[in-house]
Each structure stands twice: as structure tokens, then as C-alpha cells.
Image (cartoon, rainbow, N blue to C red):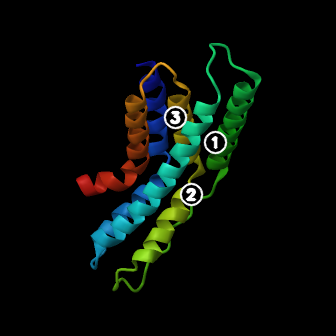
Amino acid sequence: MHVLSSIIPLDIAATLSSPIIFALSIYLLSQKYHAKAKLAAFFMGAFIVSVFVSIIGFHLGNTIPDEGTPTDTQSLIDYALAALFFFLAYRGWNAKERKPKTDNNPKGKKIFKWLAIGLIGNATNLDGLFLMMTAAKEVGSAQDISSIVQVLLIGFNIFSYTLPITFPVIL
């Protein structure tokens, strides 16, 4: 239960740190031609990135044993993640708002284009990725839960990250 209570805030923050991804998913749903196919391709890009980052975070937490007191390696990783969070918060605080480019030729599915945009857009969403990787690291470092529960928690982690894309579809 302690692992779930530690990853839920991280996953919520990863979900909320993706407003451009959310806006793009609404934009894709509002398309006149092939809206669901474009959104599915965009979702696959986000899904691939989230699975990759979750696996990295899980293995990062799994390779460092939790012995009650943090080791020097664990402390160094936690300090590095904290420094990245502070940097990303500072960058987000001082960033200028950019408007997404619109497609003037909406005809055609352009599946590979939206898959690439999904991959690149989510790979550059560093705020959400580091939060998701930290949540996966927490799951990987928990030795007192079974493998099935760890897989379910990683699945919850991936679901939370892709929620800005799936939520408009569900509605």
C-alpha cells in the first residue's frame, strides 16, 4: 500500500504535466477526416515512449536494493532526479507559450506522421517522463510486493501517462 501511495502523486503530476499532449489529442479528435486513426497513431507514440521509460525506471529501482537506509548510489540518483525536477520547474516557470502548428491539408490519414509526432512529442515531455520514471523506480525498488502487483502498478503508471490522450476519447 505504501508503494501505491507514493506513486499516485507522481502519476497525477505526470498526467497534469502534459497540457500540450491533451490539446493535441482534442485537436486530432476535432479533425474532419480520419480523426480516430490519427489519434490512435498519436497514442501509439505516447504508449511506446511510456513503456520504454517505465521499463528504464523499473530496472533502475530494481537494480539498487532497498536496505532501509539509502546507499550512496540511491542518494546520488535521488539528488540527480531532484535537480532535474528543479531545473524543469524553473524552465516551465520561465518558458514562453508556443502555439501548435495547424494542418492546412486535413485530408489523408498521415498515420506515420502522427506516430512520429507522438513519439517526439512525448519523448520531449521531460516533466512527465521524469515523474513517470520516478514512479516506476519506486515500484522497482519495492521488494515486499509480488511481481504481479509490480506489473499492475507499472500498467497504472503507463495508463496515467497516456491519460491526456485517452481521456478525450473516453468522454
Residue name at image x 38 percent, y 29 percent: 149
Residue pushed farthest front?
147
Q: Which mark is residue 22?
A: none
The answer to whether residue 16 is above or below residue 31 is above
The answer to whether residue 15 is above or below residue 100 is above
Numbered disc 2: secondary structure: helix
User: Who is closer to the viewer here, 81 or 74?
Assistant: 74
Is residue 20 at least partly visible in the picture?
A: no
> How far apart are the alpha carbons under marks 1 and 3?
18 Å
Q: Are marks 2 and 1 in contact (CB under 8 Å)?
A: no
Label located before the other in sequence (1 or 3): 1
Question: Hey, what amino acid is under mark 1?
Answer: Ala
Residue 110 occupies which quadrant of the picture? bottom left
Residue that label 2 marks: 123
Q: Which mark is residue 89?
A: 1
Q: Position of residue 171 (x, y in %)?
A: 23, 53
Q: Position of residue 92 (x, y in %)?
A: 62, 48
Numbered disc 3: secondary structure: helix
User: Who is closer to the viewer here, 107 or 6?
Assistant: 6
Is residue 112 at least partly visible in the picture?
A: yes
In the displayed structure image, the side of residue 111 where residue 58 appears, left or right: right
Label located before the other in sequence (2 or 1): 1
Residue name at image x 41 percent, y 62 percent: 44
Numbered disc 1: secondary structure: helix
User: Who is closer to the viewer here, 126 or 145?
Assistant: 145
Q: Position of residue 21 (x, y in %)?
A: 45, 58
Q: Are marks 1 and 3 in contact (CB under 8 Å)?
A: no
